[in-house]
Image (spheres, rainbow, N blue to C red):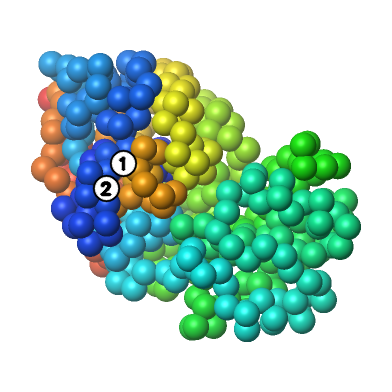
Amino acid sequence: MFKRIFLIVMDSLGCGEAPDASDFNDVGANTIYHISEHYKLTIPHLQSLGYSNLTKIKDVAPIKDPRGVFGVLEEQSSGKDTMTGHWEIMGLLIKKPFKTFTETGFPQELIAEIEAKTNRKTIGNYAASGTEIIKELGEEHLKTGALIIYTSADSVLQIAMHEDVIPLKEQYQIAEICREITLKEEYKVARIITRPFIGTNKDNFTRTANRHDYALKPPEKTTLNYLSEAGLEVIAIGKINDIFVGEGITSYQRTVSNLDGMNKTIELAINNDFKGLCFVNLVDFDALYGHRRNPIGYGQAIDEFDVKLGELLTVLKDDDLVILTADHGNDPTFRGTDHTRELVPFIAYNPQMKSYQEIEKGYFADIGKTIAENFKINTNLMGKSILKILKEAKNG
């Protein structure tokens, strides 16, 4: 049994179109490969664990004896968003995709209710980049105090507010009001996100780290609930706590970047001899580079992550397990700004592994099932455990 499991979600780092990509208009998407066509990746640690053995990466060759257990996973749920992916990783099948308002903006009935209940006018109400919309509407917001409402390709209602115009406490209250309104079946938005910013004009407006997400609760218990109910630690790093609305989480740490997330994970590995799961999300890949269609920045972020991954590997204990995966794709060379329906990597490593093994294509929920079996917990959730394969690789 592994005492500590570090599950790191490389948010949106898909590795090739899923078998049902045509249903999502995503035929040809391949996040990692298309990044490698635009940016020469230097990822020795990911390569050593078998990443380039499970998918084609330009200028990163497969190696003869990888150190890890590796393969690809397919999503079974009807979606390609953050919550659907993470929830399925932890054992939930989501058959009905969350509603999006990318093309039309939010219904006027919803906007009117938000204005009435917050006592503030709204501006915007269209799909936009968060950094661009505060350039466009931030000065009007400074003058009027109107809420900047916008969405994206995800099921999300985002509210940009200046910290000097609307104090953070009120910003969060406004988000809670929006969350309550959008629980209605006709809206059912997956997440409400506050987007606080500072600055004096469009040339220096900057978003702060005081973002807060208000997500829908998982409709059923997930693997996280079963772990915490069994007395195990479930430590969330990054936006994991928001994605699961704290359900099954025993403690959490927010992060401001991928680097911050990895530093917190490394510090935890060194200083916290917990028993259970450390669940990490690295959102910069998706938010800063995938949606903004920036393959160069995305590639640089992968290189930077690889360096930190190398640091993490050096501080692991003999009974630790690291699992690397993703929650969907977001090919920065693809049309539009939406996520892409892709297979995701599965890479697992323990310092005592004596042999590598490539697994057959599995499903997202296999991760949660494997973690549960490791801790001798029967969850009755979907998925197929590959713990036996991990033990075989460890024992040689």
Would residue 12 appear left or right of 142 to someone viewing this image?
left
Name the residue nearer the viewer: 346 or 340.
Answer: 340
Identified at 30% across, 71% down, the residue is 95
Residue 254 located left or right of residue 338:
right
Tell me the SS state at disc 1. Answer: loop
* N-terminal-most mark, 2 or 1: 1
**Would you name the residue on which mark 1 appears?**
14
Name the image quarter holding the C terminus: top left
Against 358, residue 339 (above or below) is below
Query: Do the numbered discs 2 and 1 sit on residues whose CB atoms are within 8 Å?
Result: yes
Q: Position of residue 362 (x, y in %)?
A: 17, 49
Is 102 rendered above or below residue 53?
Answer: below
The residue wearing badge 2 is 342
Quarter the N terminus occupies? top left
Q: Position of residue 196 (x, y in %)?
A: 73, 51
Locate residue 349: give its quadrant.
top left
In the foreground, 211 or 217: 211
Residue 7 in the image: state x and y as whole percent: 39, 41
Whole-percent x and y of residue 320? 36, 32
